[in-house]
Image: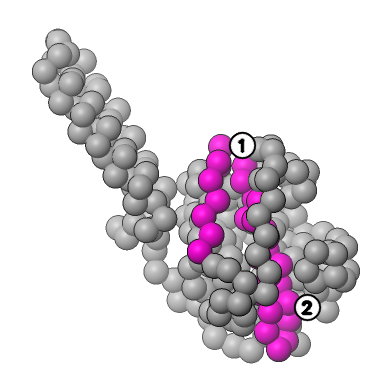
């Protein structure tokens, strides 16, 4: 299993805690079944941490005008919106909810240039709440090329309390390339011009770097 570099600090911390906890249980706990119960809990905790920070390889489809999902999860909303921060136009918003069981590494939806990065402090409402897109802690990233501009938002949820972003304005973007993650449950909103052809529907499961959300002419 490949572990994302964005989770190395957490994995190492959990591993140390598990080893210390196992040693304490080994020397301090009696009877034996209590010791084994603690071992099982610690191993389960370590296993979940490794599973959460997994980072599988993905094969990104090639093609002109493809807009690829930046996150694993389920599409909970497709709505028309007015976007005045980066697109500055009427737009369509595709919201992807990421449960704690999803891969949480995020990937660029298009190739081009990063034209906008802004961090917004905020609250920690549950990520599937419609208001989370406007009120929660989040990072907005805009990418553009000759065909299209795309704005996407990494939105922290009730459990997620840390957004990782490894890009800045002016950086090149490659569709399907990793740029960050949101830790422990979250949401990503993808905001596209109305001119695109949306190919997904609410309730559909997305795979970051692989699922085609829309096409731009």
In terms of image quadrants, where is residue 147? bottom right
Q: Write down the residue under mark 1.
A: 158
Label 1: which secondary element: loop
Q: Residue at x 34, y 35 (%)?
A: 45
Q: Write down the residue under mark 2.
A: 196
Q: Position of residue 144 (x, y in %)?
A: 68, 79
Mark 1 and mark 2: span between their CA atoms? 32 Å
What range of the chain is rendered magenta? 138-166
Marks counted in the figure total 2
**If you read the primary sequence from the N terminus, does the residue marked by circle 1 or circle 2 appear first?**
1
Label 2: which secondary element: loop
Residue 4 is left or right of residue 202, and the answer is: left
Does the magenta portion include 40?
Answer: no
Asked if 133 appears above or below 129 in the picture, the reply is: below
Question: Would residue 128 be seen by someone viewing this image from the given angle?
Answer: no
Identity of the residue furthest to the top in this view: 31
In terms of image quadrants, where is residue 67? bottom right
Q: Residue at x 71, y 67 (%)?
A: 151
């Amino acid at each position: 299993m490949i572990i994302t570099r964005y989770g190395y600090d957490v994995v190492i911390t959990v591993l140390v805690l598990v080893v210390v906890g196992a040693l304490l249980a080994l020397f301090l706990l009696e009877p034996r079944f209590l010791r084994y119960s603690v071992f099982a809990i610690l191993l389960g905790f370590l296993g979940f941490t490794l599973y959460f920070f997994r980072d599988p390889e993905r094969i990104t489809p090639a093609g002109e005008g493809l807009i690829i999902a930046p996150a694993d999860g389920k599409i909970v909303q497709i709505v028309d919106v007015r976007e005045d921060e980066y697109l500055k136009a009427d737009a369509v918003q595709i919201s992807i909810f990421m449960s704690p069981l999803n891969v949480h590494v995020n990937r660029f939806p298009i190739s081009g240039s990063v034209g906008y990065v802004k961090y917004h402090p905020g609250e920690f409402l549950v990520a599937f709440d419609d208001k989370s897109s406007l009120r929660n802690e989040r990072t907005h990233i805009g990418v553009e090329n000759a065909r299209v501009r795309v704005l996407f938002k990494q939105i922290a949820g009730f459990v997620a309390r840390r957004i990782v972003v490894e890009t800045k304005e002016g950086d090149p973007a490659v569709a399907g390339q990793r740029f960050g993650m949101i830790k422990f449950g979250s949401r990503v909103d993808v905001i596209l011009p109305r001119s695109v052809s949306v190919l997904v529907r609410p309730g559909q499961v997305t795979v970051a770097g692989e699922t085609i959300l829309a096409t731009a002419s």
